[in-house]
Amino acid sequence: MISWLKGEIVHTWKISSKKGVVLNVGGVGYEIQLLPKQIDKSETSNEIELWIQQIEREDGTSLYGFIEVNQRDLFREIISVNGIGPQIGMSILEDFEVTQLVNAIENKESNLLTKTQGIGKRIADRLIVELRNKLQRFIDNNESSYDNRKEVEPNQFSKYIDEIYLILNSLGYVDNEIKDSIKILTTNEKENTLLLNSLSAEEKAELMDKHLKEILMKLSEKST
């Protein structure tokens, strides 16, 4: 797996909306797709360092390059979402800086995400559901903050349920479907409140992710 390359740019290319370079590394030319906004930066110097995401498919191997490692790592998170391929991932990172994109996802601003070509409301909501609360490392490198246990407000469980309700509602599910699907949580309110009180912020995010996946699976089964 190629993760990083440093070499001389011997050619720049464009195919439709895709742009990239051919990088000479030790006498071997690597064809790498870049973010269009990074092409201008790469042309100011003959030599460039790129963080690489290598994707293997039946029709061949593709390389996607990024000047910053956090762009490459965020790209990996984006394409891990079901139904989102590398070209959509490149389009999103072309339109957003890393911090802007993370904030849009964390704040559930699907209206901002849909401004990127190829991103409809369903895809934007899927990005929010699957990546929200997983991207803190991109805006805060102080990992030790995750170890801090905080006091949980008395109405924390109610806020937790409200957040799940809003996410499901944004995905197009109606009131009766949502209320029925979250009964398993609301009928054990006391136990779940105690559980939330014992968790760190990171652990609560992981728990919500687990609950959402279970609920979405049940809703999907009912619709078939």
Image (cartoon, grey):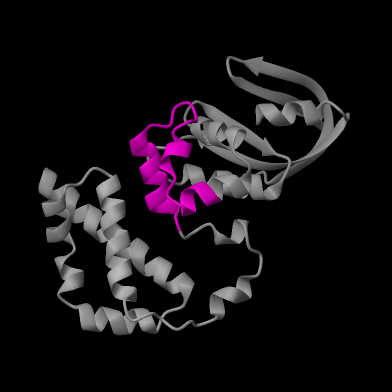
Q: Quadrant of residue 166?
A: bottom left
Dominant secondary structure, magenta = helix
Left or right of 148 on screen, residue 190: left
- Position of the C terminus, as image quadrant, is top left
Residue 130 among magenta residues:
yes
- Image height check: is 148 above or below 180? below
Any part of residue 214 in sight: yes
Left or right of 186 on screen, residue 192: right
Kindly identify the residue that appears in the image at 40 percent across and 71 percent down.
204
Kindly identify the residue that appears in the image at 34 percent across and 75 percent down.
156
Left or right of 191 on screen, residue 143: right
- Image height check: is 15 above or below 126? above
23 or 223: which is nearer to us? Answer: 223
* Residue 180, horizontal then vertical, whole percent: 12, 59
* Residue 68, horizontal then vertical, whole percent: 72, 45
* Residue 39, horizontal then vertical, whole percent: 74, 27
Any part of residue 28 in sight: no
Kindly identify the residue that appears in the image at 33 percent across and 37 percent down.
122
Residue 31 among magenta residues:
no
Kindly identify the residue that appears in the image at 61 percent across and 41 percent down.
53
* Residue 196, horizontal then vertical, whole percent: 35, 78
- Label total for image: 0
**What span is in magenta?**
103-132
